[in-house]
Amino acid sequence: MKVTRGLSRYQVLQRDSRNLGAVSFGGSCKSAGAVWTRAVKAGKTTKGMDWKRRGTAAGGSWEARLAGIPVGGPYTIEVELRGNPGKPRERLAIRDILVGDIWVMAGQSNMEGNGNLDHFPPRHRLIHMFAKRCEWMPAEEPTHWWLESPDPAHWYGMNEAQWKEALVKPQPKRDKGYGPGMAFGRMMADTTGVPVGLLPTALGGSNQEQWNPDGKEKGAQTLYGSMLEYVRRSGAKTVAGVLWYQGESETWVEGLVGVYYDAFLRMVRCMREDLGNPRLPFIFVQLSRVCGMGVEGRLWNAVQEFQRKAAGTLPDSACVAAVDLPLDDGIHISGYGQDILGERMARSALRLVFGKKFHDGPCFAGATLEGPEKKTLRVRFDGVNGRMLPERHIAGFSVCDSEGKDPCLIYEAKTDPRHPDSVLLMLDNTPAAGSVVWYGKGTNPFCNLVDSEGMAALTFGPLPLP
């Protein structure tokens, strides 16, 4: 008796609104009769999951459906093929099954993970992943490995013969590949006790066009279609949410920047429709930094600003800042930075999915000039957890005139102890008419504004002064 479809070791079953999981599964067998199943956890039969006839075997195959599995695990699903008067003829056990939340990881290289593999968090018994080779396994870094994917969308232009040739060659030891998934899953599981399943579908260098929902009809030939295929192959009919980090590729092409905002919003709407949940939580990252690499600051900042605006447009979404995180090369967040980013995304997920009282971090809410000479600029923020830090010497702000020059020296930037939602910029002179304010101007700014939960402020600008 073998199981060949519907369920495999380490699989995560997506819980429903009642915190229960269900699975239809089957395989091959030699006998005919009734199929009985039960769920066992830590050597004991799970309440309500005792032996019961839940399927049938005939003609060399068997089918069963097990429903009502409580959230948690790991479970062992035991199966027996019984004849009259009920004596088992064949049996099997599928181990390490979890019931919890499945999260799609999508986007480009910073979601795929390109941080240095200089530390490895231990495996977590409640975090599994559906690897790119389409196999459930305990989650570990690196979560993504494009070469193992059977989908042409991940082959960087290779044909099938070239992919198969590359796949069998000895692969060099990887020194990069650290992403945010493990830290995200660890914080989610430790905080809630709900297991986490990660579905890595990101591809470095991909742009919004490659994630165009129109490509779903081509299936594995496109990244969007491949993402839907991975959800199906994992055994899930829907997922708990999406973790998204993408947008760097657009900044090299001005024409792509101009259409990014509308394309992004449309993709999210279509993804929610195709995954069967109009309120599917969507957590995305605002672009971090880039050092050199020929990127124009105005294009980089334009995508960042589109992302900030999208957070205010999309319901059931969160935009998480990364501009303050360390890099391991000119554009990729370091392994240690990815740990921080994963935890930031988890806080937003805890708000969206579990109703925890977290905010997504400081986001620009307005600015006013104060004082008799209008030489103090108060910048207000929404989404602050507790208070903002550091209290003084906050870096990253700039005030420019309408031509983009920077005539206003900010000799100090500090929080207002009486108003925890405000930063006070102390200016050396009164801004000229038409001046604008930025936070994170350019491609490689130094920004250090965070709140009490470690959620960083989103970059913004240029925004006009009153």
Image: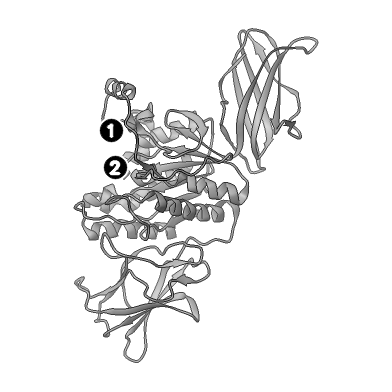
Check disc 1 and report its element: helix, strand or loop.
loop
What residue is rendered at 36% in x and 33% in y? 146
Q: Would you say 136 lies left or right of 457 here?
A: right
Name the residue at the bottom extreme.
Answer: 372
What residue is rendered at 76% in x and 28% in y? 50
Quarter of the N terminus within the rendering: top right
Residue 396: percent from left, percent from top? 32, 69
Q: Is residue 287 above or below residue 407?
A: above
What residue is rendered at 60% in x and 31% in y? 96
Disc 2 designates what residue? 205
Q: Would you say 294 lies left or right of 102 here?
A: left
- Given the image, on which type of amino acid does mark 2 rest? Gly
Quarter of the C terminus within the rendering: bottom left
- Given the image, on which type of amino acid does mark 1 rest? Tyr
Q: Nearer the viewer, residue 387 or 296?
A: 387
* Location of residue 95 (image quadrant): top right
Which is more N-terminal, label 1 or label 2? 1
Residue 450: percent from left, percent from top? 44, 66
Residue 266: percent from left, percent from top? 39, 47
Q: Is residue 111 above or below residue 410?
A: above
| Mark 2 and mark 1 residues within 8 Å of each other at the beta carbon | yes
Mark 2–mark 1 distance (CA, rounded to whole Å):
9 Å
Q: Nearer the viewer, residue 152 or 324?
A: 324
Name the residue at the front extreme.
Answer: 118
Residue 38: percent from left, percent from top? 71, 26
Q: Is residue 440 above or below residue 224?
A: below
Check disc 2 and report its element: helix, strand or loop.
loop
**Label 1 CA crowd tier, 10 Å (few <14, some 14–19, many 20+):** some
**Label 2 CA crowd tier, 10 Å (few <14, some 14–19, many 20+):** some
Disc 1 designates what residue? 156
Residue 275 visible, this orientation: no
Question: How many numbered marks appear?
Answer: 2
